[in-house]
Image (spheres, rainbow, N blue to C red):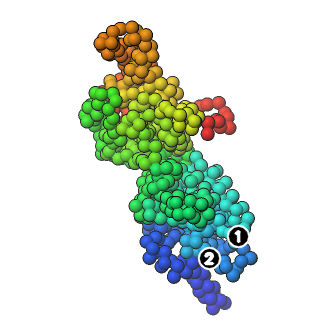
């Protein structure tokens, strides 16, 4: 009996070692020599040392056909389990490229679906590490069935627990859809690639017009498609970025975001902001500079920085409390809203609202970007997404107008009329239907045309000054209650923190409904 127990113990150890080696030592070493890490290497970078508890290490595929091509490997190409990051519990998985190229068969997908469901039940964040070549052809439709269950679990998690995807290799097909369902997607600059259709089947790649990186590489998804939230220099940097994102997020949608004490005084004056807005209303400045001056320790984690950069979004803290920052960027397209900027900001706003993260908006917007491309592309529908997201959000909403707030774009950027909680402006702010110059040219067109040519400019300047005094002055909006105050730029940090402290207990009730019909 004792010998039988010893034999079983030896057998267990052998199976554990086989599971640890995945596709074999030779394949793992080949992966490492290419500059990439194995699944277990990557989880080791992400998690606190010794905290990983693996599940389903002995799962194998159930395919009876094609066994001459597809060997059964313990774990079936994915390492999954739970662990901690800075002592904080998370669920995670990493695809193992050494096993069938990380392809997703039925059991591979069901194993991931199981860990996703466990994360949702435990109300703990999920971090996914993707590195696989799509659905496993040998599993046939069974692979699609398993993948379908996984996709359903990921959708059910949305808005309930934070999900972060790290893409560190080529990810194809439905696996790419799964990765993009996350709240945030981080791509490794060198090896991270996402494709819905395989590059091997893409005509432009076959003909040599473009390579795989140009079709679905990290930089493409950061600047053109808008899928990549962040680009990582290497795999260790990708894990660090995921941990940093997690530091702003709660464990689940019923929890408060993590508070981090700061030595940055609440009363710190922002003297540098006194002269940040140029006297010339058409001259640009950097809104990131404004944000970094106001938030704790100058730390602003910007997301999607290379995509739709006429608007900025990201995380920061005010007096230790996480906030989601949205701001127009005057140095790009004068801060105008366009299709991509509206979509970028709307999704971020909805994510912050789902996880109880207050929103702080820095506004300098002259309007929506005009032109045939924008109108034909559906700027009306996409601009409505931004307005819808702000109006729907129930978290504390604070807005600071630094300069321009014109027309429909003013309304879409968390104005008082969308039940924003605290709206203030600097003395340089202008709130109006449109810029004074454009308004005067429309309203007083005949009056200007009637005067002598040498007097036209003087008359126009006088009328512009009168229009600004009557409509554009921030005190006009304040008198109507559409601004809560007009403040000195140097007081920006203090005023926003004071308002946020009061709004921490904000709760908003609305009549029951299944959900709104956002103009997707």
Q: Residue at x 49, y 31 (%)?
A: 370
Residue, disc 1: 139
| Left or right, residue 275 beside residue 516 | left
Q: Is residue 144 above or below residue 72?
A: above
Residue 335: which disc?
none
Q: Residues within 10 Å of mark 2 (few under 14, many from 20)?
A: many
Q: Is residue 6 left or right of residue 284?
A: right
Nearer to us in this view, 480 or 276: 276
- Residue 472 coordinates in the image, percent (x, y): 39, 19
Q: Position of residue 464 (x, y in %)?
A: 36, 16
Q: Is residue 448 visible?
A: yes
State how far apart marks 1 and 2 are (Cα): 16 Å
Q: Quadrant of the N terminus?
A: bottom right
360 relative to 129, above or below? above
The residue nearer to you, when weighing 268 against 192, is 192
Residue at 46% from the left image edge and 70% from the top image edge: 36
Splitting the image into 4 quarters, where does residue 140 fall? bottom right
Kindly identify the residue that appears in the image at 46 percent across and 43 percent down: 308
Q: Position of residue 189 (x, y in %)?
A: 44, 60
Residues marked 1 and 2 touching at CB (< 8 Å)? no
Q: Nearer the viewer, mark 1 or mark 2?
A: 1
Q: Position of residue 209 (x, y in %)?
A: 52, 60
Crowding at dot 1, Cα within 10 Å, few <14 / some 14-19 / many 20+, comes out as many
Residue found 55% across the figure and 80% down from its top: 24
- Judging by the rendered image, the residue that carries numbered circle 2 is 74
Determine whether the residue tagged by mark 1 lies in a helix, strand or loop.
Answer: helix
Quarter where residue 136 is shown: bottom right
């Amino acid at each position: 009996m004792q010998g039988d127990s010893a034999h079983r113990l030896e057998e267990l150890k052998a199976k554990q070692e086989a599971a640890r080696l995945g596709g074999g030592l030779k394949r793992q070493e080949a992966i490492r020599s290419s500059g990439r890490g194995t699944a277990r290497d990557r989880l080791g970078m992400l998690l606190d040392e010794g905290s990983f508890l693996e599940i389903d290490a002995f799962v194998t595929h159930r395919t009876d056909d094609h066994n001459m091509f597809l060997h059964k490997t313990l774990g079936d190409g994915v390492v999954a389990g739970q662990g901690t990051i800075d002592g904080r519990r998370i669920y995670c998985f990493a695809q193992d490229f050494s096993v069938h190229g990380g392809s997703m068969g039925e059991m591979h997908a069901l194993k991931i679906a199981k860990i996703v469901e466990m994360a949702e039940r435990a109300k703990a964040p999920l971090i996914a590490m993707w590195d696989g070549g799509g659905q496993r052809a040998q599993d046939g439709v069974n692979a699609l069935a398993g993948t379908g269950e996984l996709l359903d679990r990921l959708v059910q998690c949305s808005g309930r627990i934070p999900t972060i995807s790290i893409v560190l290799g080529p990810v194809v097909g439905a696996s790419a859809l799964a990765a993009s369902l996350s709240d945030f997607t981080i791509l490794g600059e060198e090896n991270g690639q996402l494709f819905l259709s395989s590059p091997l089947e893409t005509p432009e790649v076959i003909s040599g017009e473009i390579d795989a990186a140009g079709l679905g590489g990290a930089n493409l998804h950061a600047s053109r498609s808008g899928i990549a939230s962040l680009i990582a220099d290497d795999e260790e940097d990708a894990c660090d970025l995921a941990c940093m994102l997690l530091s702003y997020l709660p464990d689940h949608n019923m929890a408060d975001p993590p508070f981090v004490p700061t030595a940055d005084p609440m009363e710190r004056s922002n003297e540098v902001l006194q002269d940040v807005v140029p006297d010339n209303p058409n001259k640009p400045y950097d809104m990131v500079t404004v944000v970094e001056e106001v938030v704790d320790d100058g730390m602003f984690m910007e997301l999607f920085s290379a995509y739709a950069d006429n608007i900025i979004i990201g995380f920061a803290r005010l007096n230790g409390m996480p906030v989601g920052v949205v701001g127009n960027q005057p140095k790009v397209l004068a801060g105008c809203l366009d299709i991509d900027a509206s979509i970028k900001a709307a999704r971020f706003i909805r994510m912050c609202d789902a996880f109880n993260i207050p929103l702080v908006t820095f506004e300098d917007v002259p309007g929506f970007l005009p032109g045939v491309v924008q109108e034909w592309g559906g700027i009306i529908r996409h601009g409505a997404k931004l307005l819808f997201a702000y109006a729907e959000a129930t978290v504390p909403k604070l807005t600071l107008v630094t300069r321009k707030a014109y027309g429909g774009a003013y309304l879409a950027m968390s104005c008082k009329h969308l039940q924003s909680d605290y709206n203030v402006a600097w003395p340089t702010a202008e709130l109006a239907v449109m810029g004074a110059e454009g308004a005067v040219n429309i309203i007083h067109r005949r009056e200007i045309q009637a005067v002598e040519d040498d007097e036209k400019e003087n008359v126009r300047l006088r009328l512009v000054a009168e229009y600004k005094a009557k409509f554009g002055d921030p005190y006009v909006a304040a008198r109507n209650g559409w601004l809560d105050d007009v403040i000195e730029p140097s007081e920006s940090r203090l005023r926003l923190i004071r308002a946020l402290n009061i709004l921490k207990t904000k709760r908003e009730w609305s009549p029951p409904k299944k959900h709104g019909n956002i103009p997707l």
